[in-house]
Image (cartoon, grey):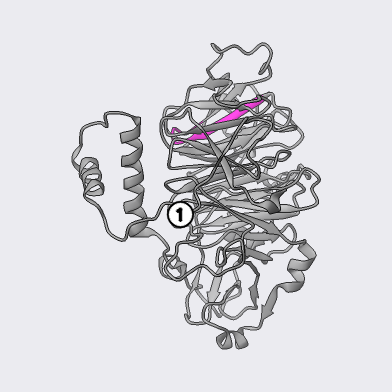
Amino acid sequence: MFDRGFPYSCKLSAHGSCVNALAFSRLDARYMASGGDDLQIHLWDFHQENLEEPCHTFIGPRSNIFCFDFSCKNRSLFAGGVDFQVYRYDISGLGTSLTREDTTASSIYRERESIREISCHPFQDEIFLSASDSGRITQYDTRVKGATVSRLAPAALAQNMIQLAAECTGVQYHPQTENLFVTSDGHGNVCLRDARMGFGTRRERCGSGVVLEYNTKLARSDTTRMSNPEASSITFDAEGDILGVTMLHFYPTLYTLSDPNPVAVCTGRYLPEGTPVSEGERTYSNSCTMKHGSFGGPASRTETYYCAGSDDFCGYLWKIPPVEELIQRREVIPSDDWLLQDCRTIGFAESMTSLRYVPVDLSTPSAVLKGHDSIVNSTLIHPYFPLVVTAGVERDIRLHNPTKSAPFSQEMELSPVRARQLSDSSTAAEARVINALLLGGIDPVDADDSERDTIRLFDRILRMEGEADPFVVRSWVPDDENDDDDDVEDRCQ
């Protein structure tokens, strides 16, 4: 079914501005949470025959929402964002005793800075992790009294907190092994950690729990500098065998759990039918906004797909070959032979003199999902339906399907064949929006005017920042190439 592409789509319209976060409920993925800049949290019921409006709405956040997660037994929904707080909503009565008047959070957990990610324990409904721009990874237990307002004693707080040297951009529990979780940060570090070593008393803690650091540094033969792009989000596949890392100014990069070097990168050099992307035509890129990818595939789990949003106003879906095949196809090149490589070849290396690992280039996506008029930030693959959900700068969410009908929609329409094109130069309307932001302007007359202004703003940002070279904007040179690499703990803390 996935190999047919996703030519049909429909909109879910309830939000008033950008949609930054999406999440499916656990178990049967019946519900989807959505939220963003309008501060409302909508729940959508995919067991409806014709899904058109939310089945429930929560309120509470006082600034932009960045992330969601459902607890493992769907008793709680957690939300976080710019206002430094994690909100826990009791959804145990959803579909039965929960009424439309039940809109507020049952608990609030305060952090120091913006919440970038929340991850719920795979087997214990009461435990979750939060990652914030303060660099703090905090483990919470909803059964602990006083934890909601961070009034734990300093010793208790220290036992449940890991402090990184940079903003923490992502945290995800391993879906099958309860003690393992992975983190990413603004310095480009992606680390696999063991909770038994990362949390607890001083005697129990060791190296902030780091058991493996993934290699995220880029090398190219035409420059003596390397690059360490920011790892802006992370996600596991359903079995926890593959880790997907979204890298700013680079491509989605895939790792196996126990191998520090990547096995594949997902690019858009070719169209789904196999023809090369024409020169000057836009394709996958990620230089603006925070993006979240996802894994999924047919319910049989025989095939794995990865989906990500792009600055060219599309979503991209790649079919992932078996891990054994990717490892076999990956190239390993000694540093002495690196200068002989094509200058367009990018490898991953720990240092200027170490081996270069060139992952498999998954250059032909299975599908390109169209219908948006601006940047796509978030993508979700439903675990059971042949469905991909995309959202971003616009207020509407899009549901993409291989066929015209679906269990949750009576009729879908063909998506546009081409994505909206970004003009080469700024327009008078864009200049008006920028001047209004700088000088203070009149509020838009209606929601359509507001969305058009938002799209114009991001068009301007794309012209200024889009498709940046990571070796220019995130260049990296080791402090001392003659010295041994710093130990894992120093790089990851």
Query: How many residues crowd around disc 1 within 10 Å: few (fewer than 14), some, or many (20 or more)?
Result: many
Q: Residue at x 48, y 82 (%)?
A: 222
Name the amino acid, label 1.
Asp
Q: Quadrant of residue 484?
A: bottom right
- 307 vs 59: above or below: below
Q: Which residue is mark 1?
A: 311
Which residue is painted at 48% across and 69% down in the image? 278
Please provide percent x and percent y for residue 485.
60, 71
Q: Position of residue 88 (x, y in %)?
A: 59, 25
* Count of numbered circles on the image: 1
**Magenta includes 434?**
no
Give residue 196's quadrant in the image: top right
Q: Is residue 173 above or below residue 78?
A: below
Question: In the image shown, does 195 or 229 lie closer to the viewer?
Answer: 229
Which SS type dominates the magenta stretch?
Answer: strand
Q: Is residue 131 left or right of residue 200?
A: left
Instruction: Indicate the position of residue 213 as horizontal and vertical percent values.
Output: 65, 60
Residue 28 appearing in the image: yes
Which region is colored magenta?
Answer: 76-85
Question: Toward the viewer: 257 or 130?
Answer: 257
Quadrant the C terminus occupies: bottom right
Mark 1 residue element = loop
* Percent of width and height locating residue 324: 79, 65
Examine the rendering and report whether any part of residue 65 can be seen: no
